[in-house]
Amino acid sequence: MIEKIYCMDVKPKMEGERVKLAGWVYRKREVGNKVFIVLRDSSGIIQTIFMKDLSEDAYEKAKQVGIESSVIIEGTVKSDSRAPTGVEIQADKIEILQNVEFFPITKDASDEFLLDVRHLHLHSPKVGSVMKVKGTLMQAAREWLLQDGWYEVFPPILVTGAVEGGATLFKLKYFDREAYLSQSAQLYLEAAIFGLEKVWSLTPSFRAEKSRTRRHLTEYWHLELEAAWMDLWDLLEVEEELVSYMVQRTLELRKKEIEEFRKDFTTLKNSEPPFPRISYDEAIDILQSKGVKIEWGEDMGADEERILTQEFDRPFFVYGYPKHIKAFYMKEDPEDSRKALAADMLAPEGYGEVIGGSQREDDYEKLVQRILEEGMDPKNYEWYLDLRKYGSVPHSGFGLGLERLVAWVLKLNHIRWATLFPRTPSRIYP
Ligand SMILES: NC(=O)C[C@H]([NH3+])C(=O)NS(=O)(=O)OC[C@H]1O[C@@H](n2cnc3c(N)ncnc32)[C@H](O)[C@@H]1O
Ligand SMILES: [Mg+2]
């Protein structure tokens, strides 16, 4: 590893010290016998100045170097209020590791072009800020899960059954049989609770969604929890505690990065438990009162959720959806056979669903009945049905779409900007 200091670690109080930095040329301009290079590394940027009368060799090299060239720069720290970070390097040495004549990404690059060259777009500090926020949200989730006694487990991705409906399965050939890419780790987490009681996993989930919306990917990162002995209402408390900790902790650690994307932090600061809870029935009433054409029993899509979120300035729950629009594994509401003990968490500011969760059907016969009602073959779920034969317990769980959470926290205009290499129906390269 090159012995170097990070841009953000160079402080005005280091005036006069000699330092070595390594990174990429972010900006460059020439003024008279001076070349100003703004150097970029993972921590940020710093201005370096090359003066002909300080080192003609370094000055001549600095004149040649192109944007995004990889360089090692040495020089003396000088405090300067005019510099972007209040300090600059009076450079007397530059090693050009690779000079870049022309970097393909320019200021007017289209979104589609940026996605075509996503592997180069990752040079961007702004993209780096998205990934830092995403990583910190997961760091916070791990902190909370550890202190609240949840066990991380590592479920399979190669599976033989649908969880969220057969229409969005990615099929693959598995030796001499058919298999699928996992839509959700849920069923395997349900098996894990008989030994570990409270489990969680972060896995890629795959959905052959043909819908080209701002909130769907075909591959996304899925944070899922499952717990024995919990009913739906216990689950909602876990969800709001976890999400509020993730948001508040990320606000604390990544305020600078979040400020690059939004100026108003109100909804983030409001994300403290308890989150508001409305029933599906109330949600339908609200939508109808706002002139939305939707009847009881219909599912809410992105447009309906967007309108509903206008009523809230923080994440909120919608619970008690009609059973027939929800998945086979959801427990019927004992107080209303038309409904499931299910709840989604919706993010405000138009973002909508970030979590889907429910209490699970724990009775063997009822679960077989639901599988048959959904037109599925119980034989394909024998192992899953076994979980209701050997010490079945009330249990609940949920799945949080990490990119959806990032999209809300950073107010991104499309979920694809929330992931390193977005996968959509029209994009699987690079
Ligand atoms: N363990 C569980 O109980 C999870 C459950 N089996 C499940 O998969 N629910 S979900 O389909 O609503 O998906 C959960 C979340 O996963 C996200 N999700 C769901 N589908 C997508 C797509 N296509 N792209 C991005 N994000 C997606 C979204 O935030 C959903 O709320
Ligand atoms: Mg859902």
Image (cartoon, rainbow, N blue to C red):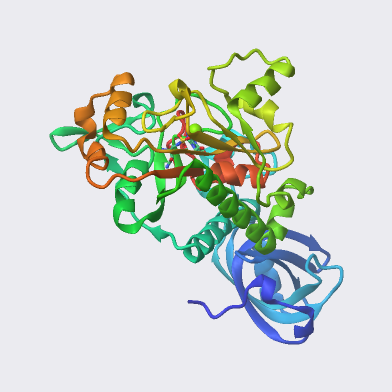
Position of residue 125 measured from the top left corner of the image (x, y, whole percent): 64, 55
Q: Is residue 348 left or right of residue 232?
A: right
For this orientation, the residue located farthest to the right is 81
Position of residue 325 measured from the top left corner of the image (x, y, whole percent): 46, 22
Q: Of 387 and 406, which appears nearest the observer?
A: 387
For this orientation, the residue located farthest to the left is 176
Q: In this view, does 44 lie to the left or right of 366?
A: right
Q: In this view, does 96 lie above or below 127?
A: below
Q: Of 119 and 146, which appears nearest the observer?
A: 146
Q: Residue at x 31, y 29 (%)?
A: 366
Position of residue 8 measured from the top left corner of the image (x, y, whole percent): 68, 71
Q: Residue at x 59, y 66 (%)?
A: 23
- Quadrant of residue 178 within the rendered picture: top left
Q: Is residue 235 left or right of residue 279?
A: left
Q: Which residue is drawn at 65% across and 41% down?
A: 412
Q: Of 367 and 427, which appears nearest the observer?
A: 367
- The answer to whether residue 419 is visible is no
Image label count: 0
